[in-house]
Image: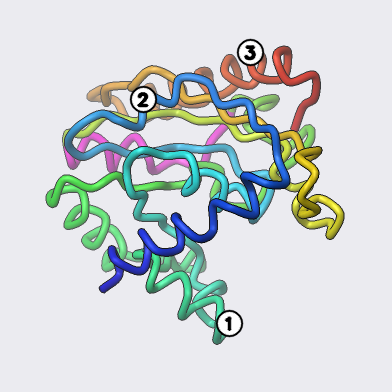
Amino acid sequence: MSDLFYKAVCFFGSYPFLLSSRPLVINLEQTRRAGAFLLAPTHASLFDTLVLVRHSYRKIVFLSIVEVFRKPFLGWFCGLMNAFPLNRSRPDPVTVLIIMDRLAGGRCVGIFPEGRLQRGAKSVVYTRQLNRGIGRIAKMASVPIVPCVVIGAEDYQHVHAWFPIRRTRYGIIFGEAIEPDEDDRKTDQRVADALAELHRQLSTRLGRSI
């Protein structure tokens, strides 16, 4: 049922973006890869998830924070979109098991490696620092990590961005897959460095930054 709902949302939900935006999407073929992998996007806006779902060739199973699932409608919607919650206030081994199960099933699992919304100087694209974790999961599951940077999706928080005149401009860039290192910290740093470089490339092409 969730996969069917996901496909329906992608089909019908693509039209508002199609009519309102002129996106720049680079290296989209990275999301066409077969088998399980982790997608590691930057996270400057709640709308990052929507534009990633719109453009990815693969269905993305997103990891979200538990607070989102406590909101009645939003929690219901995220559940139907195959997302699942993470409790950041304590170790959450149940969620790790869910991630491993989804990856064992060959899924693409989306994890925002910054752990929360980060913009400006606090973003990984400037600090080159991540919360530890994604490297460990990649090593445990023996899956690659595809880094990804999204710029401009936050414009959709404004009503005028949805007007059907194709003025809204956002960009997405996907990087080469990163195979996990034996040392989790090295993998995390490679992902952080890749995100910083992808941001440099995308911001130059797009003419704006996070």
Main secondary structure along the magenta-highlighted residues: helix
Q: Position of residue 23 (x, y in %)?
A: 65, 32
Which of 14 and 107 lies nearest the eye of the viewer? 14
Q: Nearer the viewer, mark 2 or mark 3?
A: 2
Distance between mark 1 and mark 3 Cα atoms = 36 Å
Choose top left, top right, bottom left or bottom right for residue 166.
top right
* Residue shown at 60% from the left, 47% from the top: 48
Disc 1 target residue = 71
| Mark 1 or 3, nearer chain start | 1
- The label on residue 46 is none
Choose top left, top right, bottom left or bottom right for residue 145.
top left
Task: Give the quadrant of the C terminus.
Answer: top right
Q: Position of residue 66 (x, y in %)?
A: 49, 72
Q: Would you place residue 196 above or below residue 58 in this image?
A: above
> Mark 1: which amino acid?
Lys
Q: Which residues are magenta?
A: 129-141
Which of 104 and 77 lies nearest the eye of the viewer? 77
Q: Label 1, secondary structure: give it.
A: loop
| Mark 2 or 3, nearer chain start | 2
* Residue shown at 56% from the left, 74% from the top: 67
